[in-house]
Image (cartoon, rainbow, N blue to C red):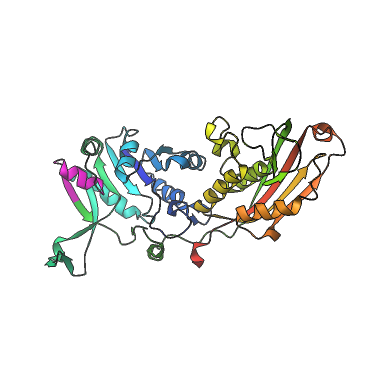
């Protein structure tokens, strides 16, 4: 049985990547990049446990994609690693960055084979260009490009990271703490994704799937006297509104559920829990804006949306076009791809008794095609 835990770091903000998609959520066929990398490592069967660090807001969504341990990352790479190490009980830990998508199995096996030679085993690449530091030329044969993954003794790396000094990799922390380091030949294929153009140097990844994703949403809200009614992002001129934690815009709530459903990201209660006072009486258009941003960051694009509003009251014919225009703008799609229909329930049920409104929503999504940028 393996005595090595794998930690994959995926909590970054992708601030230098240059696309609306966070690089860890860039789609490789159907898989987000982080899942593609996790599956590649897992297929080697060399680890007894896998831990993934995630941005705190993305933990529940990543957990919904996999059965591995997902932990909240920190503000820095080092803090994310420290958080993950709290869950490690094996004597050895292999740490890599999700941004290194094409790590070869042979490199992993080489690191493991050399694990007794030092406190940390590190892959490196030589430098072929002339190196100048502060106007002085340096002997390039003495310069190394440090890569991940790195294999460390767990107790050693935990102790090294107790320092308040920030290090860019765990081997530097171990050396600063008096530990030992052993170098092995790295791999050009283990190129790190920092900027968009780095994707051209990764031989293992392929374009996103061209599949269309479909999602449905349904919501109902009862009427409440004395509240302003917002429906489909538009103010309705009546003297009652919806009983709800937010403004109760039942159409937008159904639309959000449809979007999250198509994306495989849970439901509106998962993203905006009604126990959170932050969302008390909030304008539901803001919730939809956050949802759209999240989908874009997760590598998805909205194709079209369709709403069916079931209401005996109020009458909505004069509001449907305003709803289309308002919702299309938030979804960042043409108005022609945002449809709104209104119907009744022929006086049946709570809707027929004019006690509330029900809405069904359907949407389609595509993956963001980064190969065309």
Asked if residue 350 is positioned above or below residue 289 in the image, the reply reads above
The picture places residue 350, in percent across and down from the top left corner, at 80, 31
- Residue 114 showing in the rendered view: no
- The residue located at (79%, 50%) in the rendering is 318
* In this picture, residue 121 sits left or right of residue 101: left
Front in this rendered view, residue 95 or 53: 53
Q: Is 180 a magenta residue?
A: yes
Q: Is 177 a magenta residue?
A: yes
Asked if residue 340 is positioned above or below residue 74 in the image, the reply reads below
Front in this rendered view, residue 352 or 200: 352
Front in this rendered view, residue 98 or 300: 300
* In this picture, residue 219 sits left or right of residue 193: right
Front in this rendered view, residue 133 or 1: 133
- The residue located at (68%, 59%) in the rendering is 335
The picture places residue 76, in percent across and down from the top left corner, at 32, 44
The picture places residue 254, in percent across and down from the top left corner, at 67, 42
Q: Quadrant of the N terminus?
A: top left
- Residue 18 showing in the rendered view: yes
Q: How many marks?
A: 0
* In this picture, residue 306 sits left or right of residue 189: right
- The residue located at (79%, 46%) in the rendering is 316
Q: Which residues are magenta?
A: 168-182
The picture places residue 291, in percent across and down from the top left corner, at 56, 46
């Amino acid at each position: 049985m393996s005595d090595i835990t794998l930690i994959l770091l995926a909590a970054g903000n992708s601030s230098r990547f240059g696309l609306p998609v966070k690089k860890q959520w860039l789609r490789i066929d159907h898989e987000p990049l982080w899942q593609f990398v996790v599956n590649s490592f897992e297929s080697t069967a060399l680890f007894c446990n896998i831990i993934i660090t995630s941005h705190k807001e993305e933990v529940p969504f990543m957990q919904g994609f996999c059965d591995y341990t997902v932990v909240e990352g920190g503000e820095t790479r080092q803090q994310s690693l420290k958080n993950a190490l709290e869950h490690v009980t094996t004597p050895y830990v292999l740490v890599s960055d999700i941004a290194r998508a094409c790590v070869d199995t042979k490199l992993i096996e080489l690191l493991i084979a050399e694990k007794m030679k030092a406190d940390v085993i590190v892959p490196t690449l030589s430098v072929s260009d002339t190196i100048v530091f502060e106007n002085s030329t340096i002997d390039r044969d003495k310069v190394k490009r440090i890569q991940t993954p790195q294999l460390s003794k767990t107790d050693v790396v935990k102790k090294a990271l107790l320092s308040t000094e920030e290090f860019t990799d765990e081997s530097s922390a171990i050396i600063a703490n008096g530990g030992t380091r052993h170098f092995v030949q790295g791999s050009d294929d283990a190129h790190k994704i920092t900027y968009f153009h780095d994707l051209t140097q990764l031989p293992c990844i392929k374009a996103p799937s061209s599949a269309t994703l479909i999602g449905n949403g349904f919501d109902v809200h009862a009427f409440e006297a004395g509240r302003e009614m917002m429906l489909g992002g538009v103010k309705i001129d009546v003297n009652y509104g919806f009983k709800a934690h937010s403004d109760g815009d039942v159409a937008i709530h159904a639309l959000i559920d449809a979007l999250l459903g198509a994306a495989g990201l849970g439901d509106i209660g998962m993203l905006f829990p009604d126990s959170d006072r932050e969302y008390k009486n909030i304008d539901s258009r803001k919730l939809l804006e956050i949802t759209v941003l999240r989908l874009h960051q997760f590598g998805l694009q909205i194709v079209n949306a369709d709403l069916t509003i079931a209401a005996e009251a109020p009458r909505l014919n004069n509001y449907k076009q305003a709803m289309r225009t308002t919702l299309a703008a938030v979804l960042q799609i043409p108005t022609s791809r945002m449809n709104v229909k209104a119907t009744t329930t022929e006086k049946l049920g709570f809707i027929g008794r004019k006690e509330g409104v029900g809405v069904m929503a359907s949407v389609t999504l595509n993956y963001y095609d980064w190969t065309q940028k």
